[in-house]
């Protein structure tokens, strides 16, 4: 479970999972100071983190000589009906083309991606 708590500064918050904490803020264009992650940044971060960890776990489990991976994710809203997540990976290490393809396949099948691809519903409990 994630809990946010507002801070005294306008639009700033802390976000905690009970063990770790980060800070969020609205962008300057929305009246914040840009002093932390924005809400859409966190969506991008969730997908990027999931992909990055999964690729590294798969490489470790299958003795693939992956030295590092960098994952970039952007979220775009081209119109009112669509959201497009674009992601790119940069692999480091002496990987064969087959190993790269295997890691790309793992990246495409991640749980956060699958979750974000489904119909979402929201329930408020007050």
Image (spheres, rainbow, N blue to C red):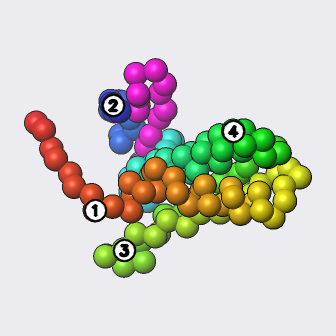
Q: Mark 4 points at which residue?
A: 61
Circle on res. 13: none
The residue tagged 3 is 82
Between 35 and 5, the one nearer to me in the picture: 5
Name which of mark 3 and mark 1 comes first in the sequence. Answer: 3
- Residue 42: x, y in percent? 46, 47
Query: Label 3 to label 4, Cα distance in Å?
Result: 36 Å
**Dividing the image into 4 quarters, which one contains the C terminus?**
top left
Magenta-colored span: 14-26
Identity of the residue furthest to the top in this view: 19
Q: Distance between the residues labelled 2 and 3?
A: 27 Å
Q: Is residue 92 above or below residue 60?
A: below
Point out residue 3 in the picture as x, y percentages from the top left corner.
33, 30
Residue shown at 82% from the left, 51% from the top = 92
Q: Quadrant of the N terminus?
A: top left
Judging depth in this view, the residue of 25 and 94 nearest the camera is 94
Disc 2 or 3, which lies upstream in sequence?
A: 2
Q: Does the magenta segment cover residue 82?
A: no
Disc 4 is placed on an element classified as: helix
Query: Label 4 neighbourhood size at 10 Å, few (<14), some (14-19), many (20+)?
Result: few
Q: SS at mark 2?
A: loop
Q: Residue 1 carries which label?
A: 2
Q: Distance between the residues labelled 2 and 1?
A: 21 Å
At 40% from the left edge and 69% from the top edge, which residue is drawn? Answer: 83
Residue 27 percent across, percent down from the top left: 45, 53
Of the numbered discs 2 and 1, the one sitting upstream in the chain is: 2
Residue at (61%, 42%) from the top-left corner? 53
Residue identified by numbered label 1 = 119
Q: How far apart are marks 2 and 4 (CA)?
A: 29 Å
Mark nearest the camera among 3 and 1 is: 1
Question: Mark 3 and mark 1: span between their CA atoms?
Answer: 12 Å
The relative height of residue 102 versus residue 68 in the rendered view (above or below) is below
């Amino acid at each position: 479970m994630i809990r946010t708590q507002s801070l005294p500064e306008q639009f700033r918050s802390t976000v905690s999972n009970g063990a770790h904490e980060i800070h969020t803020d609205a962008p300057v264009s929305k009246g914040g100071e840009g002093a932390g992650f924005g809400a859409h940044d966190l969506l991008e971060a969730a997908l990027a983190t999931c992909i990055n960890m999964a690729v590294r776990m798969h490489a470790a489990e299958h003795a693939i000589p992956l030295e590092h991976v960098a994952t970039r994710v952007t979220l775009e809203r081209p119109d009112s009906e669509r959201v497009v997540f674009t992601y790119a990976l940069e692999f480091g290490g002496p990987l064969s083309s087959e190993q790269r393809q295997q890691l790309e396949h793992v990246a495409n099948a991640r749980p956060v991606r699958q979750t974000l691809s489904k119909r979402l519903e929201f329930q408020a409990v007050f």
